[in-house]
Image (spheres, rainbow, N blue to C red):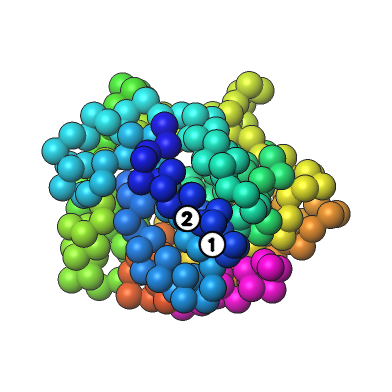
Amino acid sequence: MTTAEELERIARINAGGRTPVVFVHGLWLLPSSWDRWTTVFDEAGYASLTPGWPDDPDTVAEAHAHPEVFAGKSVGQVADHFADIIGRLERKPVVIGHSFGGLITQMIAGRGLAAVSVAIDPAPFQGVLPLPFSSLRAASAVLGNPANYHRAVPLTYEQFRYAFANAVSEEEARELYERFAVPAPGEPLFQAAVANINPWSEVKVDTQSPERGPLLIVSGEKDHTVPWAIANASYKKQERNEHAVTEIHEMPGRGHALTIDNGWREVADTVLAFVSRFAK
């Protein structure tokens, strides 16, 4: 369900005439993880919108107090949720997503709903075959227990350190964990894990859509969760689209926390440069 605050923001964006930029967060984060990014894009002349996944709480404290609200969210449900929000915008937006948000971004682009798309360390979709050990280890916090399919699953600090914050100092990793980490639904990870053997999987992207628009995939060099092998395999599938530009960029020395850690601005500027080439 679209919140009253989101509806109000959409109305302001429609009235303002600026190109909208919709940010899509991934698992274990909230929309507030994009707060610094929205400042950068708003100052560059865009109109930022940071919708939550269905039932997202407003704060990290609320998320830890009521983790059950995250449970039971599927990839298809979240993609439809963002498609509904985007459908309320009068101008086709730029869409930028991180991790599972990067997967959702590509699904949205494949539906022809995005003017420009950027998928940062995106979770794999059906047809993306590499499965590095580091990805399995990062996902084991959820996939290690089948009962987690229907649960909201938090990360311990050690799990967060490996999956997100391996490329920063111990001090920064702990600060990021306290500031940003929240529980996440288990279902999307299970869906992604079996996407290549489930012909009815929701984890599908229409990579050949003539309405897809320009797409940039950003990969963190040291990412354990979505390493280069996965990001590049996604790119290889997407670059077969004959109708639009497809590019990939590797951020040296960066891990899965690249959108929130001390180097976030370099990533944001890289993304903004791509968006500015195509967005009007």
Q: Residue 75 colored magenta?
A: no
Q: Which residues are magenta?
A: 266-280
Callout 1: 10 Å neighbours few (<14), some, many (20+)? few
Taking the spot 34% from the left edge, 23% from the top edge, the residue there is 150
Give the residue type at disc 2.
Arg
214 sits left or right of 202 in the view:
right
Q: Identify which residue, 83 or 232, lies in the foreground.
A: 83
Position of 12 with respect to 36 (left or right) is right
Give the main secondary structure, helix, strand or loop, of the magenta stretch. Answer: helix
Judged from the image, the secondary structure of the residue bearing numbered disc 1 is helix
Percent x, y of residue 213: 73, 55
List x then y, in percent, for residue 250. 56, 70
Reply above or below: 137 against 191.
below
What amino acid is labelled 1 in the image? Gly
Q: Residue at x 67, y 66 (%)?
A: 279
Q: Which residue is mark 2?
A: 12
Residue 279 painted magenta: yes
Percent coordinates x, y for residue 182 in the rendering: 25, 46
In the current view of this chain or complex, which residue is farthest to the front? 15
**Are dots 1 and 2 in contact, CB under 8 Å?**
yes
| Image mark for residue 16 | 1
